[in-house]
Image: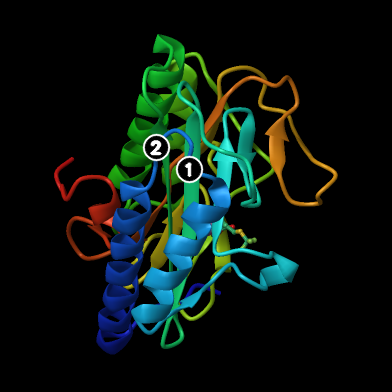
Amino acid sequence: MIPIKTAEEVEALRRSAALLVRTFRDVEKALRPGATTAELDEIAYQTIIRGGGKPAFKGYNGYPATVCVSIDEQVVHGIPGSRPIREGEIVSLDIGVNLEGFFSDAAKSYVIGEVSQEKRRLIETTRAALTEGIRQCRPANRLSDISHAIQRAAEDAGFSVVRELVGHGIGRDLHEEPQVPNFGAAHRGPRLQAGMVFAIEPMINIGSEKVRILEDGWTVVSEDGAPSAHFEHTVLITENRPEILTAGIDGNSQER
Ligand code: MF3
Ligand code: CO
């Protein structure tokens, strides 16, 4: 079943997403070599709590933190701790907000200082793949048009799409139906309708698409140890262009 959001729900989701955007801004200010991932987590926690929200990930299936901080070969779900961030690394932040029962979810990969051309290209490709997926978010298209567009953008650039983790519906819960894979044939699945809200989140690897989970039970890493990037937006389908509720985390541009 696909949730259709009322106008009131959409307003509440916009407020949730606005708090999430402020949270990214505050964490970004501290994102430099030497900062520990736990420091970044604490900043996010404070912004969300002061804004009247709750961290959506904390306690979810036992996840212990506000932010997922995933570095280089870590794909997603890295647990914050004492590790300092270093120049040359890719740092991916994934944060979710629950504001008055309405959920928003977003992620972004950053380069720290000087990084290799290949890492830069991976990040730009992953951002572009998300943009391509979002471009498919209009009524008349089907769900897998999003998936297919993301896969094409990633594979045309010579990178691979992680299969084991997917995007999702979002709104009254962090994860709602349907799942939104980042790969697959076009023109399959339900038709998109105004009022649907999706968290679309490509995870793209430089090397193999295969992943495994570390002994901490959470951190997903590329099996071959090659770098990975992750971008995510919470997106509302409308009659016309999609509304990217979390657009503010990546510049303020709604242009595509
Ligand atoms: N953006 C991810 C997701 O929607 C983050 C979930 S982390 C968890 O699945 F801790 F909440 F599981
Ligand atoms: Co998500």
Quadrant occupied by the N terminus:
bottom right
- For the residues bearing labels 1 and 2, Cβ distance under 8 angstroms: yes
Badge 1 residue CB within 8 Å of ligand 1 = no
Q: Quadrant of the C terminus?
A: top left
Q: Which residue is mark 2?
A: 32
Which of the labelled discs sits on residue 8, or is there none? none
**Residue 123: quarter of image:** top left
Which residue is at a point 20% across and 65% down the rendered structure image?
Answer: 239
Q: What residue is rendered at 61% in x and 70% in y?
A: 58
Residue 90 locus on image (x, y percent)? 48, 29
Residue ID for mark 1: 35
State the SS at label 2.
Answer: loop
The amino acid marked with disc number 1 is Ala
- Report whether residue 236 is seen: no
Give 156 or 41, whichever is nearer the viewer: 41
In the picture, measured across the screen, residue 124 lies left or right of residue 59, that is left
Q: Is residue 190 above or below residue 166?
A: below
Mark 1 lies on a secondary structure that is loop
Expressed as whole percent of the image width and height from the top left, the position of residue 124 reads 35, 26
User: Quadrant location of residue 117?
Assistant: top left
Q: Residue at coordinates 43% horizontally, 43% vertically from top-left? A: 231
Query: Is 62 displayed left or right of 85 in the figure?
Result: right
| Above-or-below relation of 171 to 247 | below
Left or right, 136 with reference to 95: left
Task: Give the colouring mode of the picture.
Answer: rainbow
Q: Residue at x 49, y 20 (%)?
A: 155
Residue nearer the viewer, 35 or 247: 35
Q: Residue furthest right?
A: 215
Seen in the picture, residue 221 relative to 215 is either above or below; the reply is: above
